[in-house]
Image (cartoon, helix red, strand yellow):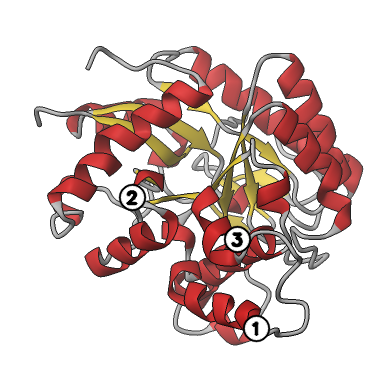
Amino acid sequence: MPDSPIRLDVHAHLVPLTPHNFPGDEAGAHWTPQGRLVVDGVELSSAQVYQPQSLLAWMDQHAVDIAWVSVPPTLYRAELDAASALRWCRLLNAALDAVVARHPTRLQALHHLPIQHPQEASRIVADAVGAGHRRFAMAAGDPVGLRTLSSPEFEPLWAALHAARAFLFLHPGRACDPRLRQLSLMNLLGGPGETALAGAHLAMSGVAERYGDITFCLAHGGGTLAAVAGRLQRGQDTGREGAWAGGEKVRVALRRFCVDCITHDAASLELAAATFGPGRIVFGSDWPFAMGLSQPRQQLDGVTPALLARILQDNGAALLQQHGGKGRAA
């Protein structure tokens, strides 16, 4: 086993539902005879995503101290109406809490928020914060209502998260551009684009500055955001209409975000560190999916030792100190 543990994995997925706590519904979710959940026609076929013990075994194998677990994007269900989305998210979050309660020193939940219904998301945050919970996850984009995170309807949500000094993990769901349906580009290109779009709206609108006590964490290295940061800044500097809201310029605002390390390219990860700051890159695995870091130390082998130490130990430890939870003895 490696000498130094990975202190925190901010990006691990579990399906906390079973046929016992969720028999299915009339809105498009049901179980197969093999015990796999089908949501809106998409089957979650990975056996491991239903198995907390498999996650814990992987964590033991790779010396991962704590994992913050969220539901996979197949469960986001952007088509649900407000009342149904509220019931669905409450079901998911209660089931996540039940899973992590059995492994309190290793697993912690990121409560899911419905991006398509900001008012209901605010209600979930209020209830969770009242119970002492300050870690959340939400889709980076709304493929149905096409809401953007700079929209005024999100202001009550940001205010609630800011007051709670909360952590919010933004993970791409389904992109809405039909041109991405070939070549697996919905995932490979659309996902990073959705994350970059979310980050750009939060940074360029001033949301990240006004609500500075929220720790926004972007999946997959911030998507394509680091690659276009210079272009966004140039647009502000040259007076592109609407590109600057009068607050922090985008290069400054981007250093308020943290991002996970899943870029699959050492040079891209170094660019992310230069854009967001080396203290803002945290470890994420995307367990148990193939696009993640199933062999983290091998897959991060090309990263400079100084940055790698911050990713695997220092930055995760800082997040744990800020947002609660202690791992095993270091």
N-terminal of the pair, mark 2 or mark 3, is: 3
- On the image, the x and y values in percent for residue 30 come to 67, 45
Which-is-in-front pick, marks 1 and 3?
3
Left/right of residue 148 with respect to residue 196 in the rendered view = right
Please, what is the three-letter code of the amino acid marked with disc 1?
A: Pro
Instruction: Examine the rendered structure and indicate whether residue 173 appears above or below residue 181.
Output: above
N-terminal of the pair, mark 1 or mark 2, is: 1
User: What distance separates the C-alpha of mark 1 from that of mark 2?
Assistant: 36 Å
Residue on which the image places disc 3 = 199
Secondary structure category for the residue under label 3: helix
| Quarter assignment of residue 127 | top right
| Quarter assignment of residue 149 | bottom right
User: What distance separates the C-alpha of mark 1 from that of mark 3?
Assistant: 22 Å
Please, what is the three-letter code of the amino acid marked with disc 3?
A: Gly
The answer to whether residue 287 of the structure is visible from this angle is: no
Please identify the quadrant where the N terminus is shown.
top left
N-terminal of the pair, mark 1 or mark 3, is: 1
Seen at 38% across and 39% down, the residue is 48
Please, what is the three-letter code of the amino acid marked with disc 2?
A: Pro
Dot 2 crowding, Cα within 10 Å, few <14, some 14–19, many 20+: many
Residue on which the image places disc 1 = 178
Residue on which the image places disc 2 = 278
- On the image, the x and y values in percent for residue 124 come to 78, 31
The answer to whether residue 149 of the structure is visible from this angle is: yes
Which-is-in-front pick, marks 2 and 3?
2
Dot 3 crowding, Cα within 10 Å, few <14, some 14–19, many 20+: many
Left/right of residue 294 with respect to residue 13 in the rendered view = left
